[in-house]
Amino acid sequence: MAEAVTQWGQLNAPQGDVPEKHRNLVLLGLPISKPDVISRLECGEELEREVSKATSPG
């Protein structure tokens, strides 16, 4: 979990807000599924940036 928190700190502001917003919704008792990225971070998986073919040259 500590590694996931460290990785969250490396995210830019909009990305870093996702885990906190999800946690707040869960605390309110709302039935929200955990986004895949949060689950992967909590498991200690390293995330890779996906590059869209639409934005890549060629």
Image (cartoon, helix red, strand yellow):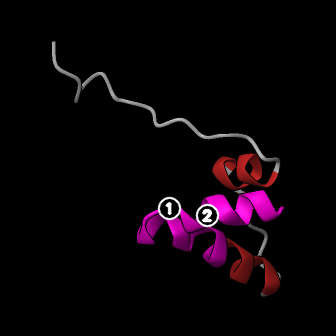
Per the rendered image, the range of residues in magenta is: 1-21
Q: Quadrant of residue 14?
A: bottom left
Please name whichever residue, 54 or 44, is drawn nearer the observer in this view of the structure. 44
Q: Which mark is residue 11?
A: 1
Q: Which residue appears at 80% of the width and 64% of the height?
A: 2
For label 1, count other residues whose C-alpha is less than 10 Å away and answer few (under 14), some (14-19) or many (20+).
few
Q: What residue is shown at x 72% (from left), y 51% (from top)?
A: 41
Instruction: Residue 33: tell me if it is visible.
Output: no
Would you identify the image quadrant in which residue 18 lies? bottom right
Q: Relative to the observer, which residue lies in front, 26 or 57?
A: 57
Image quarter where the N terminus lies is bottom right
The span from disc 2 to disc 1 (Cα, nearest Å) is 5 Å
Question: The disc labelled 1 sits on which kind of residue?
Answer: Leu
Q: Nearer the viewer, residue 7 or 25?
A: 7
Compared to 53, does 5 lie above or below?
below
* Residue topped by disc 2: 8
Q: Which numbered tag is attached to residue 53?
A: none
Q: Residue 24: image x %, image y %?
A: 70, 83
Prevailing secondary structure of the magenta residues: helix
Q: Amino acid at mark 2?
A: Trp
Q: Which residue appears at 61% of the width and 64% of the height? A: 8
Task: Residue 35: tell me if it is visible.
Answer: yes
Coordinates of residue 57 in the picture (x, y in percent): 16, 19
Asked if residue 18 is among those painted magenta in the image, a careful observer would answer yes
Whether pointer 2 and pointer 1 mark residues with C-beta atoms closer than 8 Å, the reply is yes
Nearest the viewer among 1 and 21 is 1
